[in-house]
Image (cartoon, rainbow, N blue to C red):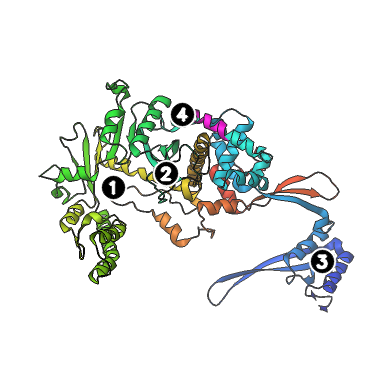
Amino acid sequence: MKCSQENLEFRLCPTAFADIIGVMMAQAAAMHVARIRSGYTDKEGQRREYESRYLRRTYRDGPRVKHETLANLSGLPETVIDSIEAALKGTALVPAARAVTILRSLPHGHVAAVHAMAVKLGLPALLGPACPERDLALALIISRVVAPASKLSTLTWWDDTTLGADLGTAAASAGRIYAAMDWLEHRQDAIEAKLAARHLAPAANPSRMALFDLSSSWMEGRCCPLAARGYSRDGKKGRLQIEYGLLTDPAGRPVAVRVFPGNTGDPGAFTAIVKVVRDKFGLAKIVMVGDRGMITSARIQAMNQLEDGTQRPDADTYEWITALRAPAIRKLMADDGPLQLSLFDEQDLAEITSEDFPGERLIACRNPVLAADRARTREELLAATEKLLAPITARVQAGRLRGAGEIGIEVGKVITRYKTGKHFAVTITDTTLTIERRQDQIDAEAALDGFYVLRTPVPAHELNAAAVVTAYKNLKYVERDFRHIKSDDLDLRPVSRRLEERVRAHVLICMLACYLTWHLRRAWAPLTFTGQDPPEQDNPVTPARRSARAQAKASGQHDAAGRPYRSFRGLLEHLATLTRNQVRFAGTRATVPVLTEPTSTQREAFELIGVPIPLTLR
């Protein structure tokens, strides 16, 4: 260390720090820390900024005030400089461990944000009157958004966040959780009726549309009455499952959910939800939108009939938008029918009529991109099937596989794997195997590539052809909700409940959590990779396009301030780093809750919800 009266330069070591403190004590009344910002432009043209810190003494020389530099503090850590500055200002410095004790630190930001959105949406009042069961049900819904897990795992997780302490659920038992689920399941009709009045009533839904689709999830265990074998949309063949149908508004906002046995078909689920909408929600003149396997001709006929088989009055008649199956489209194209390829020489959308569908409008669409994709996929699957069959053919030719029965068994194991068996002609004898493509059948199927035909009784003056196509394609919003419920956010599957009412309560909790997630994703779109303001399509038949802002997010990964964009789950994890600390100061017994300093992203997340960062949830 070098010392002089003009300047003191030192490095951080015990002796140096003792010297500077000695100087400070001798002349503390006139000393201060000066911070001087400077800058320069380097050879590359970049502006460089730096800050110098000096220990200075101020004194008067006659009428003039002068400053004397006692030491250059620039080499010291910022924390040491702050301590020196605080000591010069008269602050008594003590070790941090003696001044403040942090008794506990709990993650707070993520549960506070989700709870704030729930309160803003009126979810507590929607669930029912204030009671311990409602608090537990609300905590289960918020937990499903923040950290989806089993009910018993959620029970222990509450102790590790501020949610349990603030909502009074930290001391809950498993029995109380199951009681709250039973309480919630009994209130399902009332909850969904309020949501329907909020989002499907004419004032909020002038288009009078509701979207409905069906999905499934597999079960753990065999004792639930709802568990059955059926068509698995999760690819879990041979597993017991349940079916559940989701009803949404035209934007995909969840309104109601119904759970069915695992062997329920789409048409049966559609009949059940129409009865719910009409009888429990009291909504008339609704346009139901569903896919081609759900709204069949038989269901359309039954939808507007009374129990005695007579037709409902016009004021209580429901309309629909759905699509035709491939056989019906093929019939429209056959024998110079109304659907001809020449209609699409210069357009990709045409409205036609048919005697087979009296009183209905048929909107035919052809998507060239979809046509090319299906042709490519078909050829890949045919080639994959031929590859599987080639070893069997070689074994027969080499004499290692004989007998028509044995050969047929081996062929049957593989020819239907990719669902292309209908496109092959198979000839089997005891010593030969011949497999050929049915090219005429392949060509007939290829003629339908890219075509789909929508059917609806809604008059053209209420809904033009392009609007009908848009309404049907909006079923993608229900599919997106299913992704969020099943895997992306809420992790509904697998279902491990044994009692039927608990299964229904579990699915209802996931639906209400999806309702929360729907609003949170829209509010937090500026902070996440979620696309904002998707461009309107002049032609609804063409594939959807990403907005320029969404493309910029995906390519740049950071916003204009240099902050990284996050996924929805990643943003919740970042909010969890905003903790609430129980602090006890020296000389006191009382504890004080103190939040950590929020980051700019955490501040903006609450601003986008429209609430300040709360110290407690309530």
Instruction: Mark 2 or mark 4: name the one nearer the start of the chain.
Output: 4
Identify residue type, mark 4: Ala
Q: Amino acid at mark 2?
A: Ser
State whether residue 127 is above or below residue 324. above
Horizontal and vertical percent position of residue 376: 26, 60
Looking at the image, tell me whether mark 1 or mark 4 is earlier in sequence order. Answer: 4
Numbered label attached to residue 329: none
Q: Amino acid at mark 1?
A: Asp
Q: Which residue in the protein does label 1 denote?
A: 538
The answer to which quarter of the image holds residue 364 is top left
Q: Which mark is residue 216?
A: 2
Label 2 or label 1, whichever lies nearer to me, is 2
Disc number lying in front (3 or 4): 4
Q: Which mark is residue 57?
A: 3
Give the residues in magenta. 181-190
Query: Which of the two discs, 1 and 4, sits closer to the camera?
Result: 4
Between the C-alphas of marks 2 and 4, the distance is 24 Å
Report helix, strand or loop for mark 3. strand
